[in-house]
Amino acid sequence: MSEAWTPLLLSLKVASWATLLALLSGGLAGFLLARCRFPGRELLDSLLTLPMVLPPTVLGYYLLVLLGRQSVFGQWLEHSLGIRLVFSWQGAAVAAAVVAFPLVLKPARAAFEAVDVQLEQAARVLGLSPWAVFWRVTLPLAWRGLLAGVLLAFARAMGEFGATLMLAGSIPGRTQTLATAVHDAVQAGQDGLAQTLVLITSVVCIVVLLLAGWLAPGQGRRT
């Protein structure tokens, strides 16, 4: 049973960190796209959405080129900060975060665009700072859409395979997530283990998707 629990715990760890990274970057990008008007805004939105449509292996290759030990940025990370992303769980988290990023970006932008700007302006007239307006007016009105995106990103990160495999590999106990463990079990002819891993992954993702649907704007509890 440890053969199933170890990948599950690692997947939860990777997905949690990936979701946090996607929330910080996707939430900020969604807010800026919703509030700022500048030439090429929709083009930028399309470019940021590319991880949603690119084949995961292609995305993993880009990440390997950018973050690998032979790249300028990868060498800087290793020599200056002691961080090696290739063949590490941190690399798996970064790969999953990139893949999940658009699933936070799109709902975040829609949620922030749905906030009534007049309410924000009224708060500024009452003397609130821009930071206070965001925390006390904007975020409370947009949190449901943002959280729904976060849950979708978590589910996507839990099931990420291609980009994670390209950057982090599938090392048992170190970088082998549920998705890569299923692949390895099938390749090794361990059908029982593969079925257990598939069932665990399916249950976790279904629960997360049900929560995301319940939290989606305009949904909630219905009778």
Image: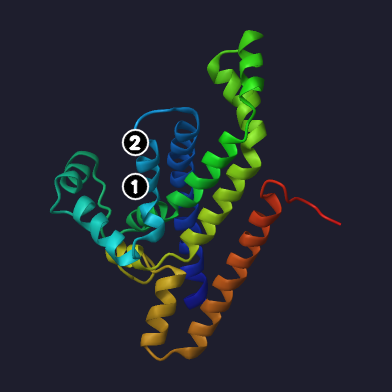
Q: Quadrant of residue 201?
A: bottom right
| Of the pair 108 and 185, the residue shown nearer to us | 108
- Residue at image position (61%, 16%) is 121
Position of the N terminus by quadrant: bottom right
Which of the labelled discs sits on residue 147, or is there none? Answer: none
Q: Which residue is mark 1?
A: 47
| Of the pair 186 and 2, the residue shown nearer to us | 186
Q: Position of residue 183 (x, y in %)?
A: 40, 79
Q: Quadrant of residue 96?
A: bottom left
Up-down: is 66 above or below 183?
above
Q: Which residue is mark 2?
A: 40
* Crowdedness near tag 2: few (<14), some (14–19) or many (≥20) residues, C-alpha within 10 Å: few
Position of the C terminus by quadrant: bottom right
* Crowdedness near tag 1: few (<14), some (14–19) or many (≥20) residues, C-alpha within 10 Å: few
Mark 1 vs mark 2: in front: 2
Up-down: is 170 above or below 67?
below
Is 2 positioned to the left or the right of 87 in the image? right
Query: Is disc 2 placed on a helix, strand or loop?
Result: loop
Q: Amino acid at mark 2?
A: Gly
Q: Position of residue 153 (x, y in %)?
A: 51, 54
User: How many labels sit on residues?
Assistant: 2
| Residue lying farthest to the front in this orientation | 39
Is 59 positioned to the left or the right of 206 in the image? left
Is 60 positioned to the left or the right of 194 in the image? left
Q: Position of residue 154 (x, y in %)?
A: 52, 56
Q: Position of residue 222 (x, y in %)?
A: 82, 55
Query: Is disc 1 placed on a helix, strand or loop?
Result: helix
Q: Amino acid at mark 1?
A: Leu
- Residue at image position (38%, 28%) is 38
Q: Quadrant of residue 69?
A: bottom left
